[in-house]
């Protein structure tokens, strides 16, 4: 049975580094599913730094809108998929169509995939519920969708880590 690990925390909390460490414990081949898009020079530099950090341990697949489709399309030989990150993916969906109300079929498909993942999965997400209530409608919509997705993903996960100050704290399940 394939496992699902969720790593959450605030910005710069060490969640991506911990997720990399987790994914390296699984047999390869390893796939890094990147959801970020290089929309400016700062983001290009961040993406480049993350690629260098991963080295040759991961094949990179970039998919900003349909991670479920990207995962399903991977080779059956894949050992583990590290997706970084759920909240960047949600931001992409909202940016593409912020006026949409109601369900996003991409989210539904992704949650369905998590019912029986085809590979071991390590997912990274930002914890967005610890701050103040955002002042504008779009930010509240993002916070609400992220909270929903994080809760549904954590319910399905075999293990969940919360990272704070670079320290991963296991809050569900057992360590690898």
Image (spheres, rainbow, N blue to C red):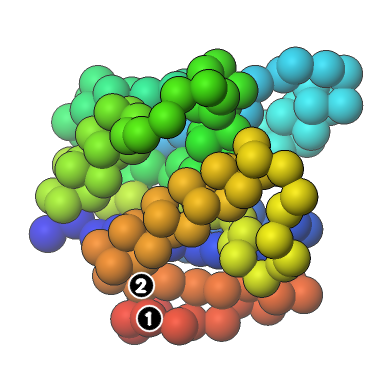
Badge count: 2
State whether residue 119 appears in this view.
no
Q: Which circle's residue, 2 or 1, is located before the other in the chain?
A: 2
Residues at discs 2 and 1 in contact (Cβ within 8 Å): yes
Q: Residues within 10 Å of mark 2 (few under 14, many from 20)?
A: many
State whether residue 170 appears in this view.
yes
Q: In the image, is 60 to the left or to the right of 49?
A: left
Seen from the viewer's position, the closer of residues 114 and 150 is: 150
**SS for dot 2:** strand
Residue placed farthest to the right in the image?
A: 42
Q: Position of residue 34 (x, y in %)?
A: 54, 31
Q: Residue at x 26, y 45 (%)?
A: 111
Seen from the viewer's position, the closer of residues 10 and 72 is: 10
Q: Is residue 51 above or below residue 145?
A: above
**SS for dot 1:** strand
Q: Position of residue 96 (x, y in %)?
A: 55, 17
Q: Residue at x 57, y 43 (%)?
A: 142
Q: In the image, is 105 to the left or to the right of 67?
A: left
Q: In the image, is 171 to the left or to the right of 133?
A: left
Residue 68 lies in what quarter of the image? Answer: top left
Q: In the image, is 154 to the left or to the right of 93?
A: left
Residue 159 image label: 2
For the N terminus, give its image quadrant.
bottom left
- On the image, numbered disc 1 is attached to which residue? 172
Seen from the viewer's position, the closer of residues 64 and 117 is: 64
Q: Is residue 173 above or below residue 105?
A: below
Residue at mark 2 to residue at mark 1: CA–CA distance: 5 Å
């Amino acid at each position: 049975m394939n496992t699902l690990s969720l790593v959450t925390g605030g910005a710069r909390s060490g969640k991506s580094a911990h997720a990399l460490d987790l994914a390296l414990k699984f047999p390869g081949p390893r796939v890094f599913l990147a959801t970020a898009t290089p929309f400016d020079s700062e983001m290009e530099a961040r993406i480049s730094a993350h690629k260098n950090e991963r080295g040759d341990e991961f094949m990179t697949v970039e998919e900003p809108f349909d991670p479920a489709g990207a995962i399903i399309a991977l080779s059956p030989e894949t050992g583990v998929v590290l997706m970084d990150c759920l909240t960047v993916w949600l931001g992409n969906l909202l940016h593409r169509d912020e006026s949409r109300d109601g369900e996003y079929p991409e989210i539904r498909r992704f949650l369905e995939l998590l019912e029986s993942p085809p590979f071991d999965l390590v997912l990274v997400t930002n914890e967005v519920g610890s701050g103040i209530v955002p002042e504008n409608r779009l930010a509240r919509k993002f916070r609400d969708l992220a909270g929903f997705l994080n809760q549904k993903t954590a319910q399905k996960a075999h293990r969940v880590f919360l990272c704070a100050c670079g320290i991963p704290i296991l809050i569900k399940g057992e360590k690898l």
